[in-house]
Image (cartoon, grey):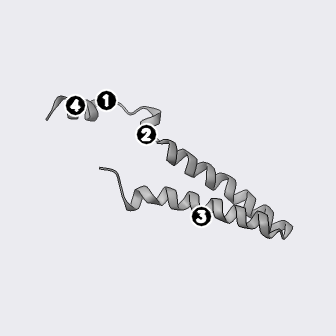
């Protein structure tokens, strides 16, 4: 095993390596999308419901992307 490979295996993960920026953004989109969609449904506002649905769908797709196509 090369030195770089050994360091990658033995080095503890930092918070950035454990959860990349895109993953945090996807979680934020889901966290904002659910209440926005609920607000739109409760107020019968198509605009808020659409914004919530788009944020929710994009966040869920981003979260599932790594499951479908994992990094090496």
Q: CA distance from mark 4 to mark 2?
A: 18 Å
Mark 4, other Cα within 10 Å: few <14 / some 14–19 / many ≥20: few
Q: Quadrant of residue 42?
A: bottom right
In space, the residues marked 1 and 2 are separated at their CA atoms by: 12 Å
Q: Nearer the viewer, mark 1 or mark 4?
A: 4
Farthest left residue in view: 1
Q: Earlier in the sequence, mark 4 or mark 3?
A: 4
Q: Nearer the viewer, residue 69 or 38?
A: 69
What's the residue at 26%, 35% (across, down)? 9
Q: Around disc 2, counting alpha carbons within 10 Å, would you say few (fewer than 14), some (14 to 19), or many (20 or more)? A: few
Q: Which residue is mark 4?
A: 4
- Tell me residue 72's x, y (percent): 29, 49
Please name the residue that numbered disc 1 is placed on: 11
Quickly name the residue at label 3.
57
* Nearest to N terminus: mark 1 or mark 2: 1
Residue 2, image quadrant: top left
Query: Contact, CB < 8 Å: mark 1 with mark 2?
Result: no
Residue assigned mark 2: 18
Mark closer to the chain start, 3 or 2: 2
Placement of 55 over or under 3, stated as above or below: below
CA distance separating discs 1 and 4: 10 Å
Residue depicted at x 18% and y 29%: 3
């Amino acid at each position: 095993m090369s030195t770089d490979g050994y360091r990658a295996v033995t080095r503890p993960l930092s918070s950035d390596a454990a959860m990349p920026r895109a993953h945090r953004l996807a979680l934020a989109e889901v966290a904002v999308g659910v209440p926005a969609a609920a607000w739109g449904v409760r107020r019968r506002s198509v605009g808020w419901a659409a914004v919530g649905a788009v944020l929710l769908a994009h966040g869920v797709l981003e979260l599932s992307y790594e499951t479908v196509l994992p990094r090496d």
